[in-house]
Amino acid sequence: MSYSIGQVARFAGVTIRTLHHYDEIGLLSPDDRSSAGYRRYGETEMIRLQQILFYRELGFALDEITVMLDDPDADPQDHLRRQHELLLDRHKRVQGMVEAVEKAMEAAKMGISLTPEERFEVFGSNDPGQYADEAEARWGHTDAYKESQRRTKAYTKADWLTIKAEVAAIEQDFAAAMAGGASTDSEVAVAIAERHRQHISDRFYDCSYEFHRNLAEMYIADPRFAENYEKVAPGLAQYVRDAVVSNAARNGG
């Protein structure tokens, strides 16, 4: 049984233009053509399209998907297992974010401010204040440190819960990209690195690409920072560092 390009577009929820593009780049070519020259897609192509859409939803670039699907040593079951694993990770992450946001909403309603005890409750062993004296000694003279101090002084428990969820989401996305085989200079990895840089700028201080690169070097040079990433996934500290460096290089940092 075969399907027209219009039928496939309707089944998959994509545009005909998208299917044309997939054909042009060799990602998904029709199994056959009708006597009038129209594209016809068979069952094999439908399965491949499903895999493409799963990987797209997980944030992989089209060139990376092409490489993975054309791997002669992989079969459809391998891809489904990998996608299932990555989607479960995303589900856990989203569920955790939902719970954190719900707590933040409740805290905001109650007007709760962040006490030292609550900070430990929110951040556990990764309390951002545990290196406060060292941070002030090393960077207290910088504009970035002063700006960070000004902003964080006004943060409530609800704010910190939201920030914690945002950081966890970025870390898990890095881990998923690494587990999926995305190189540190791939579109998906540098996009997450840019989110990481922008998060710092949005929440703490203006983080330039050069500054971000310097931070990334510290992630592997300082065991305390590296440990936080290694708890998420072995090898993640180096992966994050390399992705940040790639993103900075793309942007002249």
Image: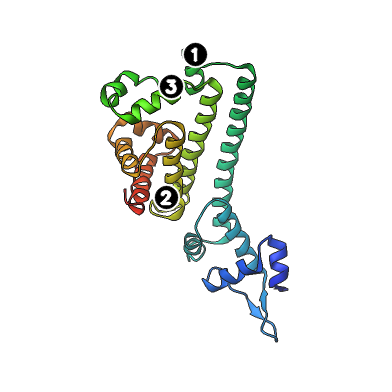
Give the image location of residue 228, x and y in percent: 40, 31
Q: Is residue 24 left or right of residue 105?
A: left
Vertical comparison of 5 with 187: above or below: below
Q: Residue at x 69, y 66 (%)?
A: 9
Screen quadrant of the N terminus: bottom right
Identify the mark at residue 196; answer none if there is no mark: none
Give the image location of residue 48, x and y in percent: 60, 64
Q: Which residue is mark 3?
A: 125
Give the image location of residue 199, x and y in percent: 46, 37
Looking at marks 3 and 2 on the same chain, the residue that comes earlier in the sequence is marked by 3
Q: Which residue is mark 1?
A: 115
Label 1 residue SS: loop
* Whether residue 126 can be seen here: no
Vertical comparison of 223 with 20: above or below: above
* Disc 2 residue crowd, few under 14, some 14–19, many 20+, Cα 10 Å: many
**Which amino acid does the dot numbered 1 rest on?**
Thr
* Disc 3 residue crowd, few under 14, some 14–19, many 20+, Cα 10 Å: few
Label 3 residue SS: helix
Vertical comparison of 225 with 80: above or below: above
